[in-house]
Amino acid sequence: MRRLLVSLFFLGAFATAASADSPPVHLKGAIQSVTGRSFSMSGGSAPVAVKVTDATRIASLETAELADITPGMFVGTAAIPQADGTLKAVEVHIFPEAMRGTGEGYRPFPQVAQGTMTNATITNILGTQGAVTDNGLTLTLTYKDGQKTVVVPKGTPVVMLGQGNASMLKPKAKVSVTGTKDASGAVTATRVLVGLDGATPPI
């Protein structure tokens, strides 16, 4: 159950290792068509062909709110370091309990300029609970080897992750894909985040 996700987050939250000669590519858009174990997606100047393999990790996500974030949750957040030593979140993924510990830790997040990814347990929250103020929330995220303070401004995208499968890969589904590109320009997906009920992957 514990799959390594980069943010998404994966996946973030998700984190995926890539070989030195095959740097990862990151795509965000909507599925246009599905053929066998591949699909075509928008998101760039031209449609991109994406291959799905047995090793591809697929996760679902649903839209959530700042008020859904509570102490004890395991979350992943892409963020940007601030001058005061805190991190400013650009999105937050809430993991289901079955995926607690996924990609735990703190690391660079190349999808965002100067970005970082922290997957950890919320051990403290400062802010107005139940009626979040314009100041948002300040989270203390604790992981095995350390702790980070993350400021989550009001309006920051928040999504809830879940288990996914290939049946979710349908035309018009909004997806975020991480994978490797071959010489023909086709992408082999290492992970796919699929938005449910019109949800859009934040990164």
Image: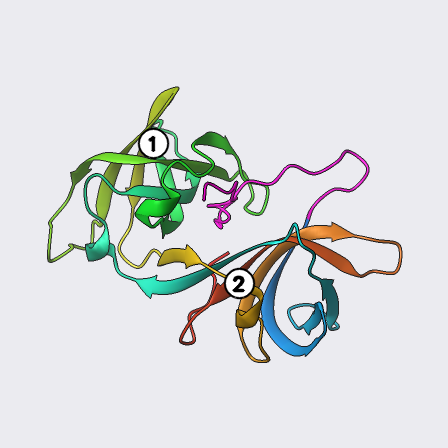
Highlighted magenta segment, given as a residue range:
1-24
How far across and how far down the image is residue 99, in percent? 39, 44
Give the residue at mark 2.
165
Q: Residue furthest right?
A: 183
Which image quarter holds the N terminus? top left
Q: Nearer the viewer, residue 105 or 55?
A: 55
Name the amino acid type tagged 1. Answer: Thr
Q: Quadrant of residue 73?
A: top left
Q: Is residue 17 magenta?
A: yes
On whether residue 125 falls in the magenta region, the answer is no
Label 1 or label 2, whichever lies nearer to me, is 2
Find disc 1 in the rendering and name its residue. 86
For the point 46% across and 67% down, the residue is: 195
User: Residue 201: percent from the left, percent from the top?
Assistant: 48, 62
* Relative depth, front residue between 132 and 189: 189
**From the viewer's perspective, is 96 left or right of 2?**
left
